[in-house]
Amino acid sequence: DADVTQTPRNRITKTGKRIMLECSQTKGHDRMYWYRQDPGLGLRLIYYSFDVKDINKGEISDGYSVSRQAQAKFSLSLESAIPNQTALYFCATSDPRTEDQPQHFGDGTRLSIL
Amino acid sequence: QKEVEQNSGPLSVPEGAIASLNCTYSDRGSQSFFWYRQYSGKSPELIMFIYSNGDKEDGRFTAQLNKASQYVSLLIRDSQPSDSATYLCAVSRWGFNKFYFGSGTKLNVKP
């Protein structure tokens, strides 16, 4: 089983719909992140959470919200989806106890908004 | 100015050659540097990290860091077609735990 699991893997929806992307992890890491990836733009940080009570905006948080339901779960919501939110979305985790603190990624959610 | 800059490529090398991938960063306070490999449609996979000036070797991969020049590179020796992927450079500052990713360099290794 994957250490960082994202659901759904693929989603096609219409403009204006509310969408939730879910992420769960079994790595025991406190820190979780949501990124989106667009061709030529690399990975851009949407939101991050250092623990259940700590939520922070990233560089492109407008139009998105998150919920950290538990240490192992971090959800991303699009309240009213628009076509330019079509992208590949990744959840990641990291462990602050390790000096190098690399990020570990889920398999991604490919989201298409028509 | 972007935090992390990479040439988008594609970089094409023949099988067996050395592939050299480069990355520059803007924050002089950056302390950890990472290379991720990403196959098309897949998630980034950590290859190496480095935080001291100089070279760090792991198998066919060598990461090189020059903090004075704010430059980090990845060398892949004896390149294989399976190395064909996009390579992402990432930097972070300890205590902040925010990563900044470059947009990636696409590598093509031709048989």
Image (cartoon, rainbow, N blue to C red):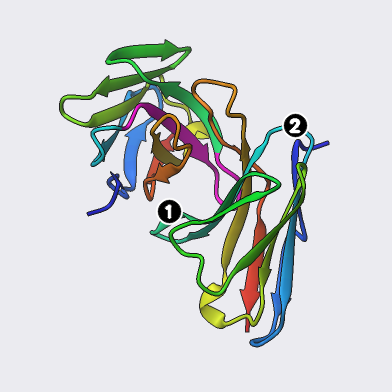
Foreground residue, A67 or A26?
A: A67
**Which quadrant does the C terminus of chain A fall into?**
bottom right
Q: Nearer the viewer, mark 1 or mark 2?
A: 2
Q: Is residue B10 above or below residue B30?
A: below
Residue B80 pos. (x, y %): 47, 27
Say left or right for B47 vs B10.
right
Foreground residue, B105 or B70?
A: B70
Q: Residues within 10 Å of mark 1 (few under 14, many from 20)?
A: some
Say left or right for A110 vs B54.
right
In the rendering, which numbered label is found on residue A42?
Answer: 1
Q: Is residue A4 above or below residue A110?
A: above
Q: Which residue is mark 2?
A: A28
Foreground residue, B5 or A50?
A: A50
Q: Is residue A7 above or below residue A16?
A: above
In the rendering, which numbered label is found on residue A82?
Answer: none
Foreground residue, A71 or A39?
A: A71
Residue A84 pos. (x, y %): 51, 77
Residue A19 pos. (x, y %): 72, 73
Q: Residue at x 43, y 59 (%)?
A: A59
- Asked whether A71 falls inside the magenta stretch, the response is no
Q: Residue at x 27, y 15 (%)?
A: B53
Residue at the right extreme, as displayed:
A1
Q: At label 2, which amino acid type do we have?
A: Gly
Residue A82 pos. (x, y %): 57, 82
**Which quadrant does the N terminus of chain A fall into?**
top right
Part of the protein shown in magenta: B30-44
Question: Could you tell which of marks 1 and 2 lies nearer the N-terminus?
Answer: 2
Q: Residue at x 68, y 47 (%)?
A: A107
For mark 2, give the secondary structure.
Answer: loop
For mark 1, give the secondary structure.
Answer: strand
Q: At label 1, which amino acid type do we have?
A: Gly
